[in-house]
Amino acid sequence: MPGFLDSTYGVADARRERRRRRIILWSLTVLIVAGILFFSFHNWKQERVVKQFISLLKQQNYQDAYKLFGCTQETPCKYYPPEKFNEDWGPAGEYKDAGDAKIQNEDVCGSGVIFTVAIPKKAPLGLWVETATNVLGFAPNGWDRCPGKHWQIWEYLKSRFS
């Protein structure tokens, strides 16, 4: 046992304290990085579907864009036939400028994600992507966001750093 006048007095306590500080610091760092990664990528697949849809509209590839709705020319959707799709998204359609659209918000609602899409010269539009199948559709009842209160932290951080 070291004495008071020995040169190693308190060295073990200092080492233990440094080790404890390092463990706490690294644990906090890992938690913060994991949280940032989770909130950045938890809707990544669904966001990719919406961006692909916008890209296909920009390229005027309406058949492939229609397929993202889970429909094809051979097996059209019962409630969204190709004629109605072209009426909405085609070159003379209501959302003909959708190729220049930008994603404003994304909200997780139950089994899907609602993306608020800003189309030039139009009111924001809500697009729904089903989480299990990644099939695109319109948001229910014309929602452009999920009903209820929304934390605006992520939007605030995006606006500050972009």
Image (spheres, rainbow, N blue to C red):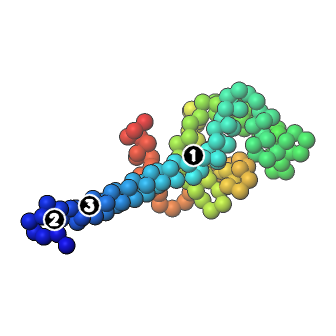
The CA distance from mark 1 to mark 2 is 64 Å
> Residue at the location (87% across, 39% down)?
73
Are dots 1 and 2 in contact, CB under 8 Å? Answer: no
Looking at the image, residue 127 lies above or below residue 148: above
Question: Mark 1 or mark 2: which comes first in sequence?
Answer: 2
Residue 2 position within the rendered picture, expressed as x and y whole percent measured from the top left: 17, 69
- The count of marks equals 3
Residue 34 as seen in the image, left or right of residue 86 = left
Residue 119 position within the rendered picture, expressed as x and y whole percent measured from the top left: 58, 36
Residue 87 as seen in the image, left or right of residue 40 = right
The amino acid beneath tag 3 is Arg
The amino acid beneath tag 2 is Tyr
Q: Mark 2 points at which residue?
A: 9
Mark 1 vs mark 3, foreground winner is 3
Question: Mark 1 or mark 3: which comes first in sequence?
Answer: 3
Q: Which quadrant would the C terminus be assigned to in this image? A: top left
Q: What element carries label 2?
A: loop
Q: Residue 116 carries which label?
A: 1
Mark 3 vs mark 2, foreground winner is 2
Q: Residue furthest right?
A: 74
The CA distance from mark 1 to mark 3 is 53 Å
Residue 31 position within the rendered picture, expressed as x and y whole percent measured from the top left: 43, 57
Residue 82 position within the rendered picture, expressed as x and y whole percent measured from the top left: 82, 39
Q: Using the rendered image of the protein, determine whether residue 158 is visible from the camera's viewpoint.
A: yes
Q: Which mark is residue 15?
A: 3
Nearer to us in this view, 70 or 43: 43
Dot 3: few (<14), some (14–19), or many (≥20) neighbours within 10 Å?
few
Q: Residue furthest left?
A: 5
